Image (cartoon, rainbow, N blue to C red):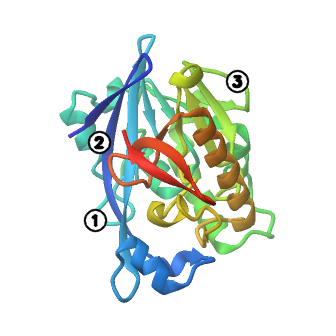
Amino acid sequence: MSQVFQIGGLELKAFSDGILKTSTEFVLGMEQPQAKSLTGANDEGAVFIPVNNFLFQKDGATVLIDAGAGDTMQATLGRLPANLASAGHGPETITHIILTHIHPDHANGLVDAAGAALFPNAEILVHAQEFDFWMAENDGSENDTIKRQRARNKINLAPYLDRVRRMRDGEVVLGCSPMLAPGHSPGHTCWRIGEGRDAFVAWGDLVHFSDIQIGHPDVAVKYDLDPDLARRSRLRMLDMVAADGLAVAGAHVAAPGLGYLTRRGTGYEFSAA
């Protein structure tokens, strides 16, 4: 199943990879009673957040934004390939995959259980800073999380190494331009796609708990490698998106994840498209 939206001259389709079980215990900078109240979490703080993906076609290309979790994480994830196929987008039809960052629920779905490319004809577009960090060799200073993720990312990207385009801010491919928004990961990227005010922003993990972090953008999460830097990136990007009136495609915003921001006091309000 997909939902279709017209943004400028693009037909943007939203697909679900499923829902990810997490906890308000990962929230930094807000007391648990308020976090639980805003998210609807249970007494223990458990809550599910959506994992949204997006697809559009331009100039003969079929572009997928992030690749889902595959079958590597939770049983409630890994639905993206079937949902794409049901809408007529088999994996062989995808020509480009934009990565907002290289974390499990965004990149593990690049490969199957044997490590073969799930999207045999796709070129990967990723910010050079993100690619270089996760594909670097360990020097002994890394924590266990980084070591595990680097090992997994070498599996995820191995079959694509001859078709990875390492991009930098200001470059444009198929109307897609990366805007570095680091903190969650060193090269976490928001992508501006389209022209002028008809563009939309695929913002990846700029927010995780959308019921909290859109209205309270100072709140960070333990998932961020650098929570303070992630907070600064979030404040900067939310301000730009609202000021420019751009549409948003949010990976962890209430499904299907498409809408607009309006300023509300010190925070923002999200309205579905």
Residue 30, horizontal then vertical, whole percent? 58, 79
Left or right side of 159 for 132: right
Name the image quarter holding the N terminus: top left
Return the mark for residue 81.
2
Residue toward you, 145 or 31:
31
Helix, strand or loop at mark 2: helix
Seen at 33% across and 50% down, the residue is 255
Helix, strand or loop at mark 1: loop
Left or right side of 261 for 9: left
Inter-mark Cα distance, 3 to 1? 37 Å
Q: Which residue was labeled with disc 3?
A: 171
Seen at 80% across and 70% down, the residue is 141
Which residue of the protein is positioned furthest toward the top in this rendering? 59
Residue 245, horizontal then vertical, whole percent? 55, 34
Which residue of the protein is positioned furthest toward the bottom in this rendering? 43
Q: Which residue was labeled with disc 1?
A: 75
